[in-house]
Each structure stands twice: as structure tokens, then as C-alpha cells.
Image (cartoon, rainbow, N blue to C red):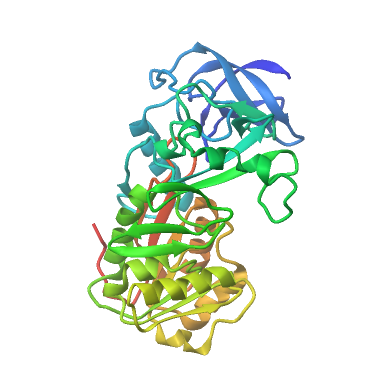
Amino acid sequence: MKKIRVNIEKWVHGGYSITHSEGRPIFITGGIPGEEVDITIEKDGKKERFGRVDQVHKVSPDRIDLDCSVFGECGGCSYRHISYEDELSLKRELLSELLSYELGKIKTIQGSPTHYRNNVQWQIRNGKPGFFSRFSHSIVDVPEQGCLNLDERLQWENLAPEIRTSSTRRSGDRNSNTKTKGDSIEVRISNEEAVDYSRNRSVFFIKGKTIHCPPKGFFQINTFLIPNWLDEIESMLGDKNEDVLELFCGAGLIGVSLSAKIPKLLGLEGHPKSIQFAKTNAVKNQIKNFEYKVSDLYQDLLPEQTKNFPTWIVNPPRSGLSSHLVEEVRKYLPKKIIYSSCNANTLQRDVKELLKSDYKISHVCLVDFFPRTAHYEVLVLLEKNESESKLIL
């Protein structure tokens, strides 16, 4: 692979710093603006290139010693070479730049920067565990101290033998979640123990509620920060206990957890198994007046009863809302939209469109569910301009 020496210009989104060479941008992993570094080009495209720092010749005062021997090779982390405080500051700066509105102060919710992940996909090659490398399916060995992002119960040596050996037992099983290029094991902390969540339901205890999640079902990876995230959503609901339409409701985590504040809820989700679990979660937690329905939100029209819900909570996948769904918002124009997103780029796109319909941004909160990575969750409260709601501080 080609090696070159460059001067790093600035931070950009995606966990990279950037420089330019031969008329093309180079997105760099492991660099800091102002540094002179040698990099290896890992991916060479016609319009852009991607590189990894090999050696630093001019060192930024912001650089810290690495705590992971495979940083840069493994595709998991982006910011292990700067302090966590600098990482949070950078994420706020990039988010503010992306939204480019008069936001005021962006609230930040943070937890421990280590051992926070409640799930992992171990890649198995020749009986050895590891993780995918950046830009390829080659396997990076596990560092001696384990993965610093993982809950200790998910470290390979701490898994039950029957889980560690499950990849070989299910090799060739067409219904399993193994990869054609090798085996994988998906493990999640459920009810305080590690389980193979590609085959087993998961159980979580959140804010006094018991939440069941289907096999392979989505659940936020940072269990420790979920109560804080939910508290922020609850504060955005305000003092008036109004009925809520929840889009992309999954297994009902948000609505069920905040049921004391919500007199009536309609939850819509495209995955039938998730809706089945949402209904079960409402019943098991003795919640009435909650209704859950299967709906392909990217294609279906919202039901007529949508007009009865003044507050919407939307928590879409990384692809965000579709143009179809934005038009559905414009049809009903709810008083308040609470938008939770794990992709700031699609959030920005959607918010830009919604602001054209006389909404205003009342509050923005960055929830760092994913420390040391380029990712973070964003909560945005949108309110109709005629609303007399005040800014949350």
C-alpha cells in the first residue's frame, strides 16, 4: 500500500481528519489537525482517498498515548488518540456546524467512555476471535486487554463455553446469522447475562419497566445511558400529558418506559416481530391505552387516527425519514416532534425540510451512546412556531 507524508488540515465528520493531495481529499484515521504525519493509503478512489497514520513527525499537544494496540486497524474506534473531553467538544462542534442554526448551547449527556457496549459481534477465523478491520473483512486480533468498549461480561474469555463454541456448531445452518466468509457470534447482555441474541430474546430492566426484545431485534447498545436518554425525551414531552404517536417504535422501549407521562399512544413499526413484542411489553407492564400496529413507514400512509396525536416521537434507523414520511408530517403538522437520531447527516436533511413547515428547533441534546467512535445520538425538539413552549435549558 502507498505511503505518503501530509499535513493535516482539520477535523471532518465520520471520525476523520482531512488533508488534500493530488487534487483529492484524503480522510485520515488517527490524525489531529496541525500534525505532520506519514500515512498509509488504505482505500484509493477516483474522487477521494482514505488513509491511516503510521508515524507522527509534528505532534499535536492534543495527542494522548494510545490505550489500544489495534487502534487504526480495527474499524471500531475513531478517537482513542485524543482525550474524551476533546472528543465530546469535537462532536458538539461538528453537530453545531452540521445543523448550522442558532442553536445556543448544545446539551451533552455522557457516561463512562469504556465498557459500555451491551452487544458485540465476534468474528471467528480458524477458531480465533477478532473484529473486522477497517475497509475489509480481514480479521484484527483482540488486543491483550480485550476490547475497551465492551461490557466485561462480553469479553471473549468471559463468555460461557457453549457460546464460544456455538459458531462451529451452527456452521452451515441457513437460518443462523453466520457470515459466508467465516463464522460470527452475536452476543448481548440480557437479564445480567450474555446470550446469543441472533437466536434468543433479550430482556432489559429500564426505569422500572421490563422490556423484552426479539431475537436480532434492535436495542440501544449503551444500556447505562438509556435512562438518561429517556429522561431527556420525557423533559421534551413537557408538563402537559398529551397523547403520543411513536414512529419506528421497535419493541416499545420509549413509550413503555415513559408510560406514566403518556395517556394514550399509537406505535407504528415495519417489523411484525417487534410489534408483537411491543404489545407484549405493554401488557406485561400493565399499560393500557397503548396500541401498536405494523406499518411500512417508508411507503404506507399514516392512519386516519394520526390527527388525534399532538406529539410525535420519531426514532428512525440511520437512513432517517423518507421524503414520503416528511410529506406525511406536513399533512398532519403535529404541535411537537421529538426526533432521536443516530445519524446526524440524515437528521440534518430531515430537520431542514421540517423547518420549511413553520417548525422551530427548541432544544438539541447530544447523547454520547458511542464513546471513542465517530457516532453519537442526537435529540432534537421541533415545535410549531405558534406554540408558546419555552426553550429547555
Residue sitting farthest toward the top:
57
Which residue is pictured at 54% across the width and 23% down the height?
70
Relative to 228, 341 lies left or right: right
Which residue is pictured at 47% across the width and 73% down the height?
357
Can see residue 309? yes
Q: Pinpoint residue 227: horizontal percent, then vertical percent.
A: 31, 56
Q: Which quadrant of the figure has residue 273?
A: bottom right
Residue sitting farthest toward the bottom:
304
Which residue is pictured at 27% across the width and 78% down the height?
241
Which residue is pictured at 49% across the width and 21% down the height?
144
Placement of 335 over or under 178, stated as above or below: below
The quadrant of the rendering that contains the N terminus is top right
The front one of 313 and 3 is 313
Q: Pinpoint residue 274: horizontal percent, then vertical percent.
A: 53, 68
Give the number of marks: 0
Placement of 141 over or under 350, stated as above or below: above
Placement of 112 over or under 338, stated as above or below: above
The front one of 27 and 149 is 149
Relative to 182, 216 lies left or right: left
Placement of 8 over or under 321, stated as above or below: above
The quadrant of the rendering that contains the C terminus is bottom left
Can see residue 90? no
Q: Pinpoint residue 38: horizontal percent, then vertical percent.
A: 60, 15
Q: Pinpoint residue 377: horizontal percent, then vertical percent.
A: 43, 51
The front one of 188 and 353 is 188
Relative to 34, 38 lies left or right: right
